Image: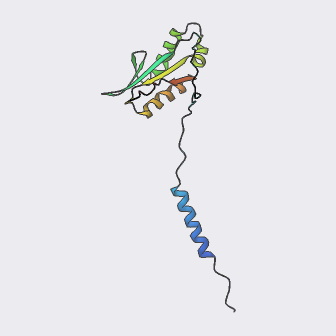
Amino acid sequence: MQPNSDPNVIPFIDILLVLLIIFMVTAPLPTVDLRVDLPPPNPIPIHLEGLNPTIVGIREGAGGLEVFVDEQTVTMSQLGQVTLDHAIRNNPALNVEDIYAEARIFVRADQSTAYGNVVDVMSRLEEEGFVKVGIFAELAQEG
């Protein structure tokens, strides 16, 4: 039997497979992203076309997260129904079917409120069927 003059590549392949597995395990997992529609660089004034918005307020209280629909305290389970009732009262020209598609719901949160809580409230409103859910924001103060 003659000695084999070709290099043995099996250990090399084994090492490459182990490295591949290590890279696959340590690679970051994809995260769930929130869809954000950014305004153009020079924002155009918003015209509400006669529709009155519903304001949902959020703040961190001593007992945890406090949610308000135009100053009325609500729980997360009541949020959808109370918001719908308020949107119907604010926009009598719209019928109930159009409220979900056309009513404007704005979420306003204190600066100290965790971003995750704002996302939870917005997600809850979208799950209830509201299409036009946005965030109130203020320009940063200079100086």
Q: Quadrant of residue 14?
A: bottom right
Q: Position of residue 91 (x, y in %)?
A: 55, 9
Q: Is residue 139 left or right of residue 47?
A: left
Q: Residue 130, located in which quarter of the rendered image?
A: top right
Residue in the image at 48% along x and 31% along y:
119
Which quadrant, please, contains the C terminus? Answer: top left
Q: Nearer the viewer, residue 88 or 135?
A: 135
Is residue 129 at all visible to an observer of this figure?
Answer: no
Residue 57, can we see it?
A: yes
Using the image, determine if residue 122 lies above or below residue 94.
below
The residue that appears at 45% across and 29% down in the rendered structure is 118
The colour scheme of the drawn protein is rainbow
**How many labels were placed on the picture?**
0
Quadrant location of the N terminus in the rendered image: bottom right
Q: Residue at x 67, y 90 (%)?
A: 3
Q: Residue furthest right?
A: 2
Lateral position of residue 89 relative to residue 59, left or right: right
Q: Position of residue 100 (x, y in %)?
A: 58, 18
Q: Residue at x 56, y 18 (%)?
A: 46
Q: Quadrant of residue 61?
A: top left
Give the farthest residue toward the bottom. 1
Residue 126: give x, y in percent of width and height. 54, 26
Farthest residue in the top direction? 92
Q: Position of residue 81 (x, y in %)?
A: 49, 18
Residue furthest toward the left? 62
